[in-house]
C-alpha cells in the first residue's frame, strides 16, 4: 500500500505542480488515442509502474486542462487536493454510509456538511438534504420530490417554470421525471438575463386557464451563460402566492453565500423549498460533488422511501438520517469526508477570502476588457462570470458573430487561458468565468493580454 501511494505521489506532485505551465488543451489525436486504448479484459496482471507510466504519458496529457489556473471556460472547478486525500481514506476503509446504523459517525459528518450549507443559505432547522454526484442529480431529485409532494399520481398536467437562460439539466430532469417537453415553460429574461416576473405570472395564468397545474419554479442563482442571478426575493413571493415549489439552482453561484456581496445578491434564497449547490464548482472540490438542500426534509423521505424485506429498520428519530431513504441511491460513495476535511482544515474564512478574490478579479477583468477597443461587454459580472463580444463599425450581426468566434479561437490557440462561448438571445458571446482557487490576478492579466492581441489580430 505504501509503495503504491508513494509511486503515485512521485507522479502526482510534479503533475499538479506543473499545472500552470501545462498546455490548456491537447485535443488532437484524441480519437486515435481512444481506439489505441481498446483491449479485451486482461487475463494476466501488469506491473503498477508500467500502468502509471502509460496513464501519465499517454492518457492524462491528451485532455482539456480543467484544473489549470487558465481554465476560465464553462464553470471551472479546481479540485482541492485535500478532497483527494479524503477520498483515499474513505475508499480505503470502504464503510457503508447508505444506512445510519452501519456508520453513524461517518453519516453524521456528512449530515454536518448538509447543516453547514443549510445554515449558510439561511434555511430553517427543518432542512435536510444529501450530497449528490452533481447539480444535475440535485435538480432531478428536487423535481421528483416536488412532483410527489405537489401533484397527484397522474401528474401530466403539472407545469414547470424556468427561464430561457436556465441550465439544460432542468429540462433534462423534467424529461427523466416523465413530463412531456411542453410542460417546461421557459420564461423570457430582461436585459440582464434575469427571469421577468411579470412574464412568469402571465404564463402561470395562461396555464391555469388551460386547465394545467403549475407546481414548480426553478430560479437561477448564477446562470451558466452569463452568471445572471434571478431576483430571488420577488420570485419567492410569487411562488408562495401561486403555491409553486420554489427551487433555486445555485450550482454555480451558491457558495458565494459565504461572502457578503454574494449574500446580498442571493437575497431570497432562504425562502426556497429546495436549493441545488455544486461543491465541485464554487467550493473548489473535485468533480462528482453536488448537493441538494430541501426545506422540509421529511418531503425527501416521502418521495423516496420504499421498503425492502432484507433491509434493517430505519432511524425514526427526527435528527438522524438514513441516506438510502431520502434519495435514489442505496449503495453510494461516502461523499462526506471530501467536503468535511477541506472545510475543517481551512475553516470557512479561507473559502470566503478565495471567493471574494474571484469577485474582485471579475470586476478587474471587466474594466480591463472595456479598455480594449472593439470589445463590447454583454454581461457585467454579478458574481465572477462575465460575457463580451467583439464588434467593428459597419459589420452586420452575422459578421460580428464570426469575428467574435475568430477571437475566441485565437485566444485559445495561445494556450495560456481557455475560454468558451455561448449563443445568448441570438448573439454569440465569449464568456469568462473566474472560479478556480488557482486563478489569480497574474492569470487574468494573461487573459486580458491574449484577448487584446487576438482582437487586434482578427
Ligand atoms: C453546472 C450546472 C448544473 C449542472 O451541474 P452538474 O454538476 O454539471 O451536473 C446545473 N445548473 C447550473 C446553473 C450549473 O452551472
Image (cartoon, rainbow, N blue to C red):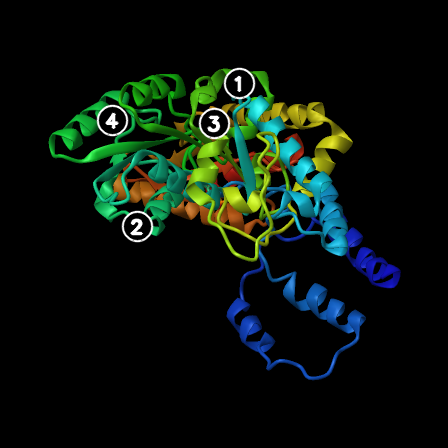
Residue at label 2? 178
**Between 392 and 63, which is closer to the camera in this rendering?**
63
Query: Which of pointers 4 and 2 indicates the residue nearer the eye?
Result: 2
Helix, strand or loop at label 1? It is helix
Q: Earlier in the sequence, mark 4 or mark 1?
A: 4
For marks 2 and 1, give the CA distance.
35 Å
Quadrant of the image containing the C terminus:
top left
Quarter of the figure with residue 12: bottom right
Instruction: Note whether ligand 1 is within 8 Å of mark 4.
Output: no
Compared with residue 417, is residue 299 higher up or lower down, i.e. above or below? Answer: above
Compared with residue 414, is residue 260 higher up or lower down, i.e. above or below? Answer: above
Residues marked 3 and 1 touching at CB (< 8 Å): no
The x, y position of residue 432, in whole percent, is: 50, 36
Residue density around tag 1, few if under 14, some if 14–19, many if 20 or more, within 10 Å: some
Q: Earlier in the sequence, mark 3 or mark 1?
A: 1
Q: Earlier in the sequence, mark 2 or mark 1?
A: 2
Residue density around tag 3, few if under 14, some if 14–19, many if 20 or more, within 10 Å: many
Helix, strand or loop at label 3? It is loop
Query: Which of pointers 3 and 4 indicates the residue nearer the eye?
Result: 3
**Between 6 and 379, which is closer to the camera in this rendering?**
6
Residue 200: mark in rendering: 4
Q: Is residue 337 left or right of residue 277?
A: right
Instruction: Note whether ligand 1 is within 8 Å of mark 2.
Output: no
Residue 295: mark in rendering: 3
Residue at label 1? 263
Q: Earlier in the sequence, mark 3 or mark 4?
A: 4
Residues marked 3 and 4 touching at CB (< 8 Å): no
Amino acid at each position: 500500500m505504501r509503495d503504491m501511494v508513494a509511486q503515485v505521489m512521485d507522479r502526482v506532485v510534479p503533475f499538479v505542480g506543473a499545472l500552470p505551465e501545462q498546455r490548456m488543451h491537447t485535443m488532437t489525436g484524441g480519437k486515435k488515442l481512444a481506439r489505441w486504448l481498446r483491449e479485451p479484459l486482461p487475463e494476466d496482471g501488469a506491473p503498477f509502474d508500467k500502468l502509471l507510466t502509460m496513464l501519465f504519458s499517454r492518457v492524462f496529457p491528451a485532455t482539456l486542462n480543467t484544473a489549470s489556473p487558465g481554465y476560465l471556460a464553462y464553470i471551472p472547478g479546481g479540485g482541492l487536493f485535500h478532497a483527494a486525500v479524503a477520498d483515499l481514506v474513505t475508499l480505503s476503509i470502504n464503510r457503508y454510509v447508505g444506512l445510519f446504523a452501519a456508520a453513524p459517525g461517518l453519516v453524521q459528518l456528512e449530515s454536518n456538511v448538509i447543516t453547514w450549507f443549510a445554515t449558510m443559505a439561511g434555511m430553517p432547522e427543518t432542512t435536510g438534504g444529501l450530497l449528490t454526484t452533481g447539480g444535475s442529480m440535485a435538480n432531478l431529485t428536487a423535481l421528483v420530490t416536488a412532483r410527489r409532494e405537489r401533484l397527484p399520481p397522474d401528474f401530466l398536467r403539472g407545469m414547470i417554470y424556468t427561464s430561457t437562460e436556465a441550465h439544460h439539466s432542468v429540462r433534462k430532469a423534467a424529461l427523466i421525471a416523465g413530463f412531456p417537453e411542453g410542460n417546461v415553460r421557459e420564461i423570457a429574461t430582461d436585459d440582464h438575463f434575469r427571469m421577468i416576473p411579470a412574464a412568469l405570472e402571465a404564463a402561470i395564468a395562461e396555464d391555469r386557464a388551460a386547465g394545467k397545474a403549475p407546481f414548480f419554479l426553478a430560479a437561477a442563482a448564477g446562470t451558466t451563460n452569463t452568471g445572471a442571478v434571478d431576483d430571488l426575493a420577488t420570485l419567492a413571493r410569487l411562488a408562495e402566492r401561486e403555491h409553486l415549489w420554489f427551487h433555486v439552482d445555485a450550482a454555480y453561484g451558491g457558495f458565494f453565500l459565504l461572502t457578503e456581496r454574494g449574500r446580498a445578491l442571493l437575497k431570497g434564497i432562504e425562502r426556497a423549498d429546495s436549493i441545488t449547490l455544486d461543491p465541485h464548482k464554487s467550493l473548489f472540490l473535485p468533480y462528482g460533488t453536488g448537493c441538494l438542500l430541501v426545506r422540509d426534509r421529511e418531503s425527501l423521505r416521502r418521495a423516496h422511501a420504499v421498503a425492502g424485506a432484507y433491509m434493517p429498520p430505519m432511524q425514526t428519530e427526527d435528527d438522524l438520517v438514513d441516506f438510502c431513504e431520502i434519495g435514489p441511491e442505496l449503495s453510494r460513495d461516502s461523499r462526506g469526508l471530501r467536503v468535511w476535511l477541506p472545510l475543517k482544515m481551512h475553516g470557512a474564512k479561507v473559502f470566503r477570502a478565495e471567493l471574494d478574490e474571484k469577485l474582485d478579479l471579475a470586476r478587474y477583468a471587466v474594466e480591463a476588457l472595456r479598455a480594449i477597443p472593439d470589445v463590447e461587454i454583454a454581461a457585467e459580472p454579478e458574481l465572477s462570470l462575465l460575457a463580451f463580444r467583439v464588434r467593428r463599425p459597419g459589420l452586420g450581426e452575422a459578421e460580428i458573430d464570426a469575428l467574435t468566434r475568430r477571437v475566441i479561437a485565437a485566444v485559445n490557440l495561445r494556450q495560456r487561458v481557455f475560454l468558451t462561448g455561448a449563443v445568448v438571445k441570438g448573439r454569440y458571446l465569449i464568456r469568462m468565468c473566474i472560479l478556480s482557487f488557482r486563478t489569480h490576478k497574474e492569470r487574468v492579466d494573461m487573459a486580458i493580454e491574449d484577448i487584446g492581441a487576438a482582437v487586434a489580430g482578427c
